[in-house]
Every structure is written in structure tokens, then in C-alpha cells.
Amino acid sequence: MTAGLVNKSTAHRRLQTAAIESIIVRDAIQADLPAIVEIHNAAIATGISTAQLEPVTAEGRREWFHAHCPAQYPIWVAELDGAIAGWLSFGEFLPRCAYRGSVEVSVYVHEKFRRRGIGRKLLQQAIARGPQLGMHSLVGLIFSHNEPSIGLFRVAGFERWGFLPGVARIDQTPRDLTIFGRGL
């Protein structure tokens, strides 16, 4: 019985590894913007993973997109099975010169692709490629009730660096913000 469980566990890990290896992470292009917006709007609707409260449009996000691509703070998309399964963006952490190299990272995964390694692969790429982009620290600002994102960042080696109680309001409900970070 135990051998059967071990073999199933090993087989499951192999499948997960193969799935993660089939994820393609690349720089976002203009044609990806509608998929990025769709994923972001789904996150807005949940009230769990973004402080953005109103849905956005591709036209409304065009300036944001062009400010990132292919600037110092790129946007990456993860493709799986020919679809945009998730995206990651880098942003300025704070505008003072002393914080240059400390970068906020945001990760969003399409709901039908969750729990398939998309977020993990995007964060792994950020950690591996961040130094080449002049980054020395990555910071994630995560609502404290967003347990899946907290788990994702912890698995990627991020630690809790700060806690801001009740700083956000989602549907009149106070929400805490946890700051996660890791050096590169």
C-alpha cells in the first residue's frame, strides 16, 4: 500500500514538472493586452488580489502597458496550451533614488489555469532574471486574506517584511496588507 502511494506521489510530481516545463514565459506584446486585461478584471471582481476596484479596458491600460514594455520594468506573460495563462509585471517600489533596484512584483493567473505552476514559473523567472534587469530586491504587496498568493510567494522564498493593518477598503471592509520580499 505504501509503495503505491509513493509511486502515485512520484508520478504526480513528474506530471507537475512536465507541466511547468511546458509553460513559456516571454515579454508581453501589444496583442497580449486584451488577455492581460481579462485576467486582471477577473481578479478585480474577486476583491482578493488587487486594490484596483473598477474594471479596466485594454484602451485604458495601453499607456500603462507602453510604460512597461520593454522598459526597465517589463511585463511578462506565461503561455500554456496556446493561451495566455497569466502575467507578471514589475513596478517601481518607491520613487526615491535609494530604493532603485527594489522592485514591486505583481502576479496574476487566469482562473482556469490556477494550481498548474503558472505563478511559480513567473516568480522563478523574476528571481532568476531580476539581477540582469538591475534588481536586487523583489517586493510583493499582498492582501493578508489572499492565502493562495501568500503561499505562492513563500514557496518562492519570499519572507514577510511588513504588515499594514486595515490600510485598504474593499466593499467597505478593512483589509490588511502584508509585504513580502526577498533579495536577489
Image (spheres, rainbow, N blue to C red):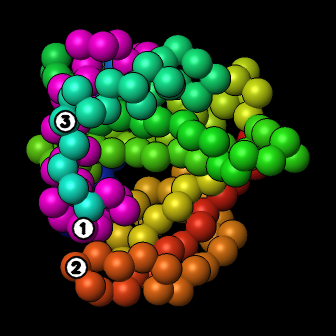
Secondary structure mostly seen in the magenta stretch: helix
Residue at image position (55%, 51%) is 156
Q: Which dot, 1 or 3, sits closer to the camera? A: 3
Whether 149 is drawn above or below 161: the answer is above
| Amino acid found under the numbered disc labelled 2 | Asp
Q: Residue 163, located in which quarter of the rendered image?
A: bottom right
Is 26 covered by the magenta stretch?
yes
The quarter of the image holding the C terminus is top right
Query: In front: 26, or 168?
Result: 168
Circle 3 residue = 57
Q: Earlier in the sequence, mark 2 or mark 3?
A: 3
Query: Are there few (<14), some (14-19), or many (20+) residues within 10 Å of tag 1?
Result: some
Q: Which residue is drawn at 34% across and 13% down?
A: 29
Circle 2: element type: loop
Q: What stretch is highlighted in magenta?
A: 25-52
- Is residue 159 one of those drawn in magenta? no
Residue at (47% x, 65% y) in the render:
142
Q: Where is residue 52 in the image (x, y as percent from the top left)?
A: 32, 57
What crowding class fits label 3: few (fewer than 14 Cα within 10 Å), some (14-19), or many (20 or more)? some
Residue 18 seen in the figure: no
The CA distance from mark 2 to mark 1 is 8 Å
**Which of disc 3 and disc 1 is earlier in sequence?**
1
Q: Which residue lies under the disc numbered 1?
A: 47
